[in-house]
Image (cartoon, helix red, strand yellow):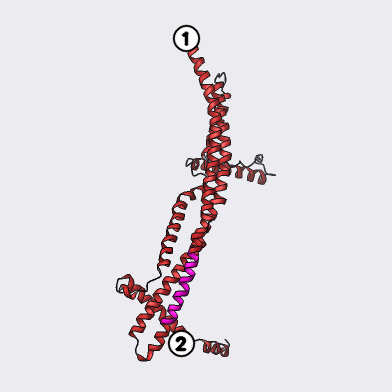
Amino acid sequence: MDWSKFQSSFSNINFSQAGSKLTKGFNSGVQLTRERFGQVAPEDITELPQEYKDLEARVDALRQAHISLLKITKAYENESYDYPVQIQESITELSTTIGHGITNFAANNLKGTNLPVPSPVAAPTAQPKTLPHALCRAATSAASAMQGAPGGNEHKFCNALAEYAGAWEKIADARIQHDESIYTEYLQPWQTTLSTSIGAAMKARQAVRSSRVELDAAKQTLKNAGPAKHEQARLDVENAEDDLVQKTEVAITLMKAVLENPEPLKNLNELAKAQLLYFAAAAEALSSAQGAIEELSVAAEGEYRKSRDH
């Protein structure tokens, strides 16, 4: 170790300044603790400007609005938010994927041995885990099964299932677009606003709170200071007052910027718009399918009654 450098660095430490910061921090901690336990008279707590307090209340309301809506709309980040049964499908797909992996491993590693070598197989295509996709798959599968049944004469029901499946295929496509739009145009910017501009305003308010506590602690120190420390204590109070004014102005500016920001309103509009487009597409697809299914239903009922009359 170069002791000359160590001694030089050691001698450059301002112990007086470090000790002053430590003392201020301790005094602020004591002040905050006494306030929490109600040991400080209201008149000994510095009153912040009414404008500042009003802005605090408004920002708190805006922040809570973001949090409340986000708790629900974060569901859109999970593809299967409307289809909890997908857990069972995921387990089945996992088994299929594992089987595919084992088969291809064997195909690649059993060559040249006396063991039978399976043919490589393609990986199973991942299926979206949404209710519209599940309804489409179920209806398509049901129609195929009925068409493949020998001697069947349920063509109207098969056609109805195909109409239903076709409607939900369109809805499934709209659902994917719906989720993507909500994620990019609403969820991401909504969370960004909460973590950046609102977050910055909240940090600025915390700085105001700390500065206010430090000022009141300095005032308390001045009140109890003896003649030898009175002047320094008075300067500490003045510095703390200047610091509080500066930090309050910064916080007011940031809070006003948060409240004037049009981005949350724009984001909310994008959420509503994505939902409107999705439900409109769903209504159109189902309206068309339902009309066709109703015609098949009426025809089938007519045939049924006619057969009973003979």
Circle 2 is placed at which residue position? Answer: 16
Describe residue 243's horizontal placement relative to residue 270 as left or right. Answer: left
Which of the two discs, 2 and 1, labels the residue nearer the N terminus?
2
Report the magenta residues as a range.
237-255
Residue that appears at 54% across and 27% down: 161
Q: Where residue 128 sits in the image (x, y, percent)?
A: 56, 42
Secondary structure beneath dot 2 equals helix
The amino acid at mark 2 is Ser
Q: Is residue 225 above or below residue 247?
A: below
Residue 221 counted in the magenta span: no
Q: Is residue 167 above or below residue 15?
A: above
Circle 1 is placed at which residue position? Answer: 309
Q: Is the stretch drawn in magenta largely helix, strand or loop?
A: helix
Q: Which numbered tag is attached to residue 125?
A: none
Count of residue discs? 2
* 182 or 114: nearer the viewer: 182
Rendering quarter of residue 263: bottom right
